[in-house]
Image: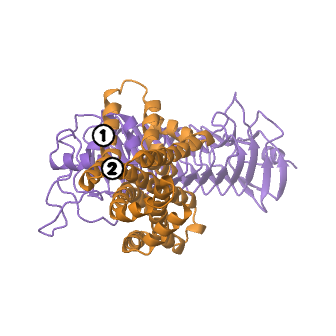
Amino acid sequence: MSIKDAVSTAREGDQIIIDGGLYFESNITIDKKLHIIGKNNPIIDGSNSRTDEVFVIQADSVIIENLQIQNVGPSFVKDLAAIRVQRKQNFIIKNNTIVGTMFAIYLEYAENGEVSRNTITGTESNVLSAGNGIHAWNCQAIDIVGNTVINQRDGIYFEFVNDSRITNNVCKDNLRYGLHFMFSNDDEYSNNIFTNNNAGVAVMFSKNIIMHDNKFFNNWGGSSYGLLLKEIYDAEIYDNYFNKNSIGIRVEGSSRINYSNNDFINNGWGIKIAGGCYDNNITSNNFISNAFDLSIESTINSNTFDGNYWSRNNGYDLNGDGIADEPYRPVELYNYIVTKTPEATILLRSIFLDIINLSEKVTPIFTPHNVIDNTPLMNRLYF
Amino acid sequence: MDKIFRYSFYDLIRGRWSISYFLFYLIITIVLFSFSNDVSMVVISLLNIIIVLVPLVAIVFGIIYFYNSKEFTELLLAQPIKRSRIFVGQFLGIATSLSLAMLLGIGLPFIFYGIFISSEISNFIVILLTGTCLNFIFVALAFIIALKNNNKIKGFGFATLLWLFLAVIYDGIFLLLLILFNAYPLERLALGLTLLNPIDLSRILIILKLDVSALMGYTGAVFNSFFGNIGGIFLAALSLIIWITIPLFFIINISNKRDF
């Protein structure tokens, strides 16, 4: 009996157990409440059809678990997914292994669902024919927990998704972003690991996003970064760890954001702020051994940088309160020059630059006056 | 030549200078390793030492040795030996002993901390190779200056000035050019300018090995593709070799013409 037959003969609320084996099936539409569960590692292979998806969920409260789904797409005409949820609520997709599919899990107009502990591995090497691991479009209150997404286009993609949480996921080796937000508000992502993606995480055109306890590392390359913020308002970024990214956080046109308790270690730039960023507070972070800790491209600045630890600061603390007695200017002259003349990066680690940095530090003339940490810490913070 | 080379080489490696130079590198590298066990961080810290100190010590030590062994050199000149053999032999003796002190001083701690099983081995080799080249280049430059100037003070002055120019002032002019001609595509000019200065060339070679090139945007990409392919590496190596051979040629030429 094929899975398709089983689904069509089942009644509302039934449980379908798929036993181990290799099933070449696709275009299974689930139009009633079902609990589909795999036993003894069944593999469902979509390669018999190049234009169909495997599961399309068109009913509320569907659960799909313990399946392996493979070989769906790619197609340049349609976005093909292993599991697609269309306009339904209360779905659960968990413990599945999805290999070599264009999109793995595609949620459209879905609500109150859970996608958890799935392992998704893409096989594409071309960003044009690859799809996203977990793709959510126009959704509400989705939980994405404990998934591993490897080598897709975007690991997790959110567009018009509100009130959702992304926790404990691992996104690595993705061809574009580990996590990508567009036009999504009031979401939270935490305890995720983003590593070796082409360009880390991008959060764009979104409001009230909370980002905490994530690890961003080894997102390294010419146009790469750990986290990109573009047109973001009222976000909270705390307890994150940025290590070995070309740019820890790249900020463009984003305002009213609080950055606190983050570690920026061994990045090219810790934070690189382009124009149009106002009223951001950067407080209680560690900036350690970055090639450049902070760079600001605009002259108008209403952002504050107080109470951070800067490993480059060689200030002194006579009264022993842990706060350096002199304010610290995190933007060095060389940093300022590189912002104006990017070619000057080839003089990195030349002694000449150490000398002009020192002279600028003694009498600041060029570096922005208002980019200043009034209470720089003497010792690294541990969170 | 080999006799004179051997004589000055053994003379030098038994001397206090070479031993303390060796100990200096040994201690510095061990201290760096005690701060961090991360081999790549130690390589970065050593980069600064290599591109600043190696040329300075080589040029100063070359000058000192030349002036100090002047009487002995004049004695040798009275013998039926070719002049070029005497000076080239001495040059090789100094450059080799300095290089040996540096290679052992840096190399031993790295071997002890397991460079051979580390992925940083290629960076390590680039550091040692460029360091060795810098030693040879700056000892040769020291010899030219010393041969040209009988006056010790003048010789020292020129030597330190030359070091200051190549290590510091050159980069200042470089930066000034980059800023002034910001509106033009400067990648080729920048490439040319780095090939012309052995200190800059060494710095760039090491930096690119450390993958800082991702920070450099388009310029970095141009540099990386240039130094990343065989032709670029060949050209960089050629430039370093030219920086050794041309001064060597001058040493032979000047020493043949000079009236001692």
Q: Position of residue B46 (x, y in %)?
A: 42, 61
Between label 1 and label 2, give the one nearer the viewer: 2
Q: Nearer the viewer, residue B240 or B8?
A: B8
- Would residue A42 be seen by someone viewing this image from the given angle? yes
Instruction: Label 1: state its secondary structure.
Output: helix
Q: Nearer the viewer, residue A240 or B256?
A: B256
Q: What residue do we see at 49% from left, 55% from top?
A: B88
Which residue in the structure is indicated by mark 2? B163
Which residue in the structure is indicated by mark 1? B172
Q: Nearer the viewer, residue B206 or B99?
A: B99
Q: Position of residue B10 (x, y in %)?
A: 48, 72
Q: Amino acid at mark 2?
A: Trp
Q: Residue furthest top?
A: B183
Figure chain in purple: A
Pointer 1 and pointer 2: residues touching (CB < 8 Å)? Answer: no
Tell me if A72 is positioned left or right of B113 in this view.
right
Numbered disc 2: what chain? B
Instruction: Label 2: state its secondary structure.
Output: helix
Mark pair 1, 2: CA separation: 14 Å
Q: On the image, which quarter does residue A214 sit in?
A: bottom left
Tell me if B212 is positioned left or right of B148 in this view.
right
Q: Earlier in the sequence, mark 1 or mark 2?
A: 2
Q: In the rendered view of the protein, which quadrant contains the C terminus of chain A?
A: bottom left
